[in-house]
Image (spheres, grey):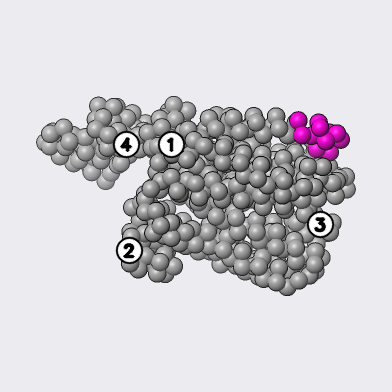
């Protein structure tokens, strides 16, 4: 084992309210935020939320439920309680983030990881998680994370005591996690990692116990892949036409990208620039080669306590990212191959080993406490500042345009928001920039036509609509 947790972590119930308070304060900018991108698709404009048969539609139709019917069920329940007032949805998200931080703390304590509370708190307030906590749509991450961590905790309790009820609860929570978001299908791999950590090797019974989880994961994964494939096919564009070589290159780049953003969370943005991947370039393979080399070195050093801890962390990090590394088509990849909310669970694989290593070096409790407080304060300040980006649509897309000026999606969505506000001249500028970057972007043409109609230029609108139709053909 890496060692015992620090002195403060021996009093968990004293630390829990502190973690909750810190989490709610850090996400204060989200308390009064509004709805942003995709919130309409999932909630405010989703017909199942106001339909008498909405709950049945969620569970019986892939069209509405996609691969997260349990998350949509939560939205359905919330909409019945406070309709479409944004604040309660944001507060629920923040509360779930705080609860997830507590569960991470309890799991790390059970695994006897040094600096458990600091690691859990750092993860709860980390800037890369602002996107998940501040974006109502990402209830998917928060709710699936809740059940994911509960499943891990119950499985560890079962492994320690052998009581069947804990195994049953782990399985039930695993199902709930996967029905909340399919990316938690990595759960059985994480459980095996935990068993390796606890026992130093995989026992036959560990493998047998994981079989039901793997069966569930396979079923959910097939459904998710089919659903995403349907979205890609309906889009009818070629952003996803990647060969296997390009997919491996993207995976290598993405792993280092996410690790970098976790260790140095600056220049975060809602939509990152989309990489231009060329399989023919030898240098493009360097990130993947470095990942493999790192794994091999850590495997060789697994006999040392720090090597074993690092290997566990890297293993968890890569496993957590598997669904979004590019091996399977994800609709969002048409905009970027990476996103902060993609690494919601995986970021623990970087944060925890780093904190554990520092806690192991700093023997004095006072030194650990001071270092932990400074680190938490620094990340909290960054998260507070980043949280304001998500306060409304205009703030979100202006931030993306400023940081990623070639993002067509941002220009078009900002234009649409400005049209809604009646700021047509500014909206037209955004449309023109979007079409300069991508001349055949249909949504930009449509918004331009809408502006012309609003300004009484019906003839010009008709001509532009016809030209854009010809370009699309």
Going from N to C along the chain, the mark reached first, 4 or 2, is 2
Q: Residues within 10 Å of mark 3 (few under 14, many from 20)?
A: some
Q: Residues within 10 Å of mark 1 (few under 14, many from 20)?
A: some
Residue reaching furthest bottom?
A: 164
Closer to the observer: label 1 or label 4? 1
Q: Is residue 208 above or below residue 106?
A: below
Magenta residue check for 472: no
Q: Nearer the viewer, residue 232 or 160?
A: 160
Relative to 138, 49 lies left or right: left
Q: Which residue is mark 4?
A: 417
- 269 left or right of 252 in image: left
Point out the tag, 3 or 1, that comes first from the N-terminus: 3
Q: Residues within 10 Å of mark 2 (few under 14, many from 20)?
A: few
Q: Secondary structure at mark 1?
A: loop
> How far across and down, in percent of the image, does residue 404 sit?
46, 30
Foreground mark, 2 or 3? Answer: 2
Q: Secondary structure at mark 2?
A: loop
**Which of pointers 1 and 4 lies earlier in the amino acid sequence?**
1
Segment colored magenta: 359-370
Q: Earlier in the sequence, mark 1 or mark 2?
A: 2
Residue at image point 75% right, 63% down: 157
Residue placed under numbered mark 3 in the picture: 198
Name the residue beneath numbered marker 2.
51
* N-term mark: 2 or 3: 2
Which residue position is annotated with label 1? 391
Q: Are marks 2 and 3 in contact (CB under 8 Å)?
A: no
């Amino acid at each position: 084992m890496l060692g015992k947790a620090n002195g403060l972590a021996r009093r968990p119930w004293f630390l829990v309210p502190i973690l909750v308070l810190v989490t709610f304060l850090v996400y204060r900018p989200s308390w009064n935020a509004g709805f942003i991108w995709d919130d309409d698709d999932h909630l405010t404009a989703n017909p199942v939320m106001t339909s008498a048969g909405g709950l049945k539609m969620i569970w019986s139709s892939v069209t509405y439920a996609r691969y997260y019917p349990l998350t949509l069920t939560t939205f359905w329940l919330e909409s019945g309680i406070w309709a479409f007032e944004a604040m309660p949805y944001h507060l629920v998200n923040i509360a779930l983030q705080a609860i997830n931080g507590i569960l991470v703390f309890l799991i790390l304590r059970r695994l006897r990881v040094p600096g458990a509370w600091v690691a859990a708190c750092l993860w709860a307030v980390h800037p890369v998680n602002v996107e998940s906590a501040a974006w109502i749509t990402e209830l998917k991450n928060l709710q699936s994370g809740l059940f994911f961590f509960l499943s891990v905790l119950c499985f560890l309790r079962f492994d320690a005591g052998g009581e069947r009820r804990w195994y049953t609860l782990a399985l039930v929570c695993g199902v709930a996690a996967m029905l909340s978001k399919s990316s938690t299908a990595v759960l059985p791999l994480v459980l095996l990692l935990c068993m390796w950590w606890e026992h130093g090797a995989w026992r036959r019974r560990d493998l047998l116990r994981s079989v039901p989880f793997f069966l569930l994961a396979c079923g959910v994964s097939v459904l998710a892949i089919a659903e995403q494939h349907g979205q890609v096919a309906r889009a009818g564009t070629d952003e996803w036409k990647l060969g296997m070589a390009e997919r491996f290159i993207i995976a290598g780049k993405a792993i280092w990208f996410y690790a970098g953003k976790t260790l140095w969370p600056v220049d975060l943005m809602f939509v990152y620039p989309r990489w231009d991947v060329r399989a023919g370039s030898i240098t493009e393979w360097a990130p993947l080669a470095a990942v493999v080399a790192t794994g091999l070195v850590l495997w060789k050093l697994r006999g040392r306590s720090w090597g074993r801890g690092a290997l566990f962390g890297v293993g968890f990090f890569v496993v957590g990212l598997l669904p979004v590394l590019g091996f399977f088509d994800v609709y969002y990849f048409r905009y970027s191959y990476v996103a902060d909310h993609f690494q919601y669970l995986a970021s623990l694989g970087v944060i925890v080993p780093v904190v554990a290593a520092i806690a192991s070096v700093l023997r004095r409790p006072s030194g650990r406490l001071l270092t932990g407080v400074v680190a938490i304060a620094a990340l909290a300040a960054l998260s507070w500042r980043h949280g304001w980006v998500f306060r409304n649509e205009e703030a979100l897309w202006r931030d993306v345009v400023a940081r990623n000026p070639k993002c067509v999606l941002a220009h078009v969505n900002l234009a649409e928001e400005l049209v809604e506000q009646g700021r047509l001249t500014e909206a037209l500028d955004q449309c023109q920039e979007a079409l300069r970057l991508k001349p055949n972007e249909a949504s930009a043409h449509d918004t331009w036509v809408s502006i012309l109609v609003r300004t009484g230029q019906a003839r010009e609108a008709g001509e532009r609509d016809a030209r854009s139709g010809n370009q699309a053909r």
